[in-house]
Image (cartoon, grey):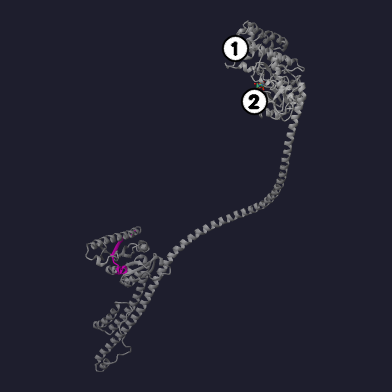
Amino acid sequence: MGSIGEIGGAEMVLDVDETIFVAVSEEVERSRTTVLWAARNFSGKKICLLYVHRPVRPASWTQKKLVGGTFRKHAVKVIERVDKQKVDEIMDSYLRLLSQAEVQTDKLCIAGQNVEEGIVELIARHNIKWFVMGAASDKHYSWKMTDLKSKKAIFVCKKAPDSCHIWFLCKGYLIFTRATNDVSNNRQTMPPLVQLDSDTETRKSEKMESSYMRRRLRYWRSLLEQDGEKDTGQSEREKVEPRATSNVSSGSGSSFGEPVGPEPPAGPEPSGPESARLDTLTTPDIEEKKREGNVAREVHRYDKAMHDIGQSERTVYGEARNELKEDDSTMEALCKAKALEGLCIKELSRRKKLEELLEKEKDEVNRVIEQNNGFMKKLQMVEGDNLKLERQIRRLQDLEKEHGEKFDTAMELLKSFRQKRDEIRIDHENAMKEVNALKRLIKGKTVESGSEMLDYSFMEINEATNEFDPSWKLGDGKYGSVYKGSLQHLQVAVKMLPSYGSQNHFEFERQVEILSRVRHPNLVTLVGTCPEYRSIIYQYIPSGSLEDCLSSTNNNVPALSWESRIRIASEICSALLFLHSNVPCIIHGNLKPSKILLDSNLVTKISDYGISQLIPIDGVDKSDPHVDPHYFVSGEMTLESDVYSFGMILLQLLTRRPLSGVLRDVKCAVENDNISAVLDDSAGEWPVARGKKLANIAIRCCKKNPLNRPDLAMVLKFIDRMKVPEVPSSETSSYSDQKAPRRPPSHYLCPIFQEVMKDPLIAADGFTYEAEAIREWLANGHDTSPMTNLKMEDCNLIPNHALHLAIQDWQNQW
Ligand SMILES: Nc1ncnc2c1ncn2[C@@H]1O[C@H](COP(=O)(O)OP(=O)(O)OP(=O)(O)O)[C@@H](O)[C@H]1O
């Protein structure tokens, strides 16, 4: 037990028998394995951390500067505090480390500039018996390591008191043990886990001891037996023992190998003064002397024996030491072997895992190889296919090249063909123009008699309708679309007939031929046709249809007067009668107010006559009240069918009522002699008698039985009788003063003569002139236009039939 002033001044009590002191460095990591080794191997013992702290002393603090100053005192205090704090921190770290090992802990700290000296001093001061310290830093460790590397360790090993047992460790492995010479003590207090070392030592010691003691005791026994036989007293033994004791004790301070004094000379008898004295002695003296001589010899033998024993002990002790050293090595080897075994086990398990992994890897590799082989096969196949494809591509490329060349040639040909086609087309157009011009020229003479009409090419119609401009479209009927157009300064309506259900080209031309011969002031003039595209070209009637007039709700548009209505009825009847009397007879087949066009003078112009024969359609709209109901029985359009339709128009002219139920209402009004009730007020004040007559005619025309329907000639007579000069009105100015000469439209006048043309001819400048005037102009050697004064391309003159017809119509009305 002992006590020491710790850093910080506190004192502590140490039980050096039960405490293992472990030298620790400033860095916990460097001493970690050593501390843990101690905790592991000395269970039940207290672990005291021994730390020699080197206090901080800045080099700049020279003795001269600091001596006696208050600053120095203060600085020293600060440093001490810092040092203590640091030491506490270090110790705390170690204590934390040991707290897991569940061992009793303590700490012993001392301040000093030299660590190894501090350690040795502490061992000596506290009589420390068990001490553990590092043999070298961990990085020096190798399994072959047996020597101390650390200077501190070497110093402590050499200088520490022999009573201290020291274990030197490196990286947690016991490298070297410095055993104490106090073997018995070792045995008593040796920690269990290092008992192997100690036991070995103890066994060796016991072996040596017992051997020594046995021999020694045997010797003493024999000596004493001899003494007893010769009856020697205690005084003689006492003479011998002190010598022997002194000799033995002289060797006990050090090792067993100390020499035991000079060896007495060998020989059976002693010589010199003592033997001379034997001669003068009496027998008892002589015997006494003999006995003394014997004792002396025995003592000499004893001394010699003791010397031998000493020699033997030295030898044995040397052997024992060697054996102890060997045992240390063995222990170390065992530890290493144990460690190696642990490592081996770990390695084996690692190896096993690695082997398992390797197996898995092998399987994976095999799988990948198989997959790879599969891929390779596929790749080979693909490569084969690729080669085939490449060959095909090359062939296709050759073909493409070949076809490209052919294509280029074909394109060249196509280009040249197109060029030729365009040339031919132009030639054709020109030829057609010439043919048409010639035709017109030839026909011109017959047109005057009103029996011929003109053919137009598609190009001409296309041009006339501004390429069928949608904004020029007049409407869509069941017999096709109608476009407004301009043909040779004449406004026309081009009806594009559908191709379905039509007769062949010749039949179409034949029918059109029939229609073209029909001329009547109340029929829309058929200007021409385009057989190529099944188009019929009519004179354009600008003022809309009877349907527009009757259905208009616009107050600004004047309503038709009853006189106009009777006149229109007469005109319709007249035109129908004319169509029916034509050879062959022409049935309108689709008569209704939308087909009764009105020109600017409200003169009736029936359109679409004969179209139903031209384009027979599959079904007629049953809901159309203008259609003869008998048609739906017989399926045939007859003259009477037109009469029926005319009757329906009469009813509308009279009443301007919706057609459904109008016949019933009018019949009722007539029967009730109350025709005024149904007459249209907007027409003015109807003469009731005329209204009633007209209503009766209408009712008769609408008889269900066609045979009961009246003859149109008779109807016309009746209606004509009803006609009276119409009441002049501001709205119907053209009719307002019928007796006064009407001013002709300007385009009816010849630009040269300024008179209404009788024989209008179109010159190359596009203007229409009176035949006589323009011929005279040309005959006088003019090659320029009388209107523009520009040179005309040629002197050809083409009859303007459309204008001629229009003028004729106008003159007829007048
Ligand atoms: N010669 C023309 N002059 C001026 N407008 C015309 C002429 N012919 C037809 N139209 C206009 O074109 C429109 C379409 O006429 P279209 O005869 O094709 O059909 P729709 O009479 O309305 O009925 P449907 O189907 O019975 O023939 C008419 O409503 C009329 O306004």
Precedes in sequence: disc 2 or disc 1: 2
The secondary structure type at the circle numbered 2 is strand
Mark 2 neighbour density, 10 Å: few (under 14) some (14–19) many (20 or more): some
Above or below, 55 against 276 in this view is: above
Q: For the magenta stretch, what is the residue range?
A: 102-120
* Res 632 → quadrant: top right
Residue 326 % position (x, y): 40, 72
Residue 89 % position (x, y): 31, 59
Residue type at numbered disc 2: Lys
| Mark count | 2
Q: Residue at x 27, y 69 (%)?
A: 125
Above or below, 161 against 673 in this view is: below
The secondary structure type at the circle numbered 1 is helix
Q: Answer whether residue 663 is visible to the viewer in this image.
A: no
* Res 43 → quadrant: bottom left
Residue at the spot of label 1: 682
Residue 212 % position (x, y): 34, 77
**What numbered label is drawn on residue 473?**
2
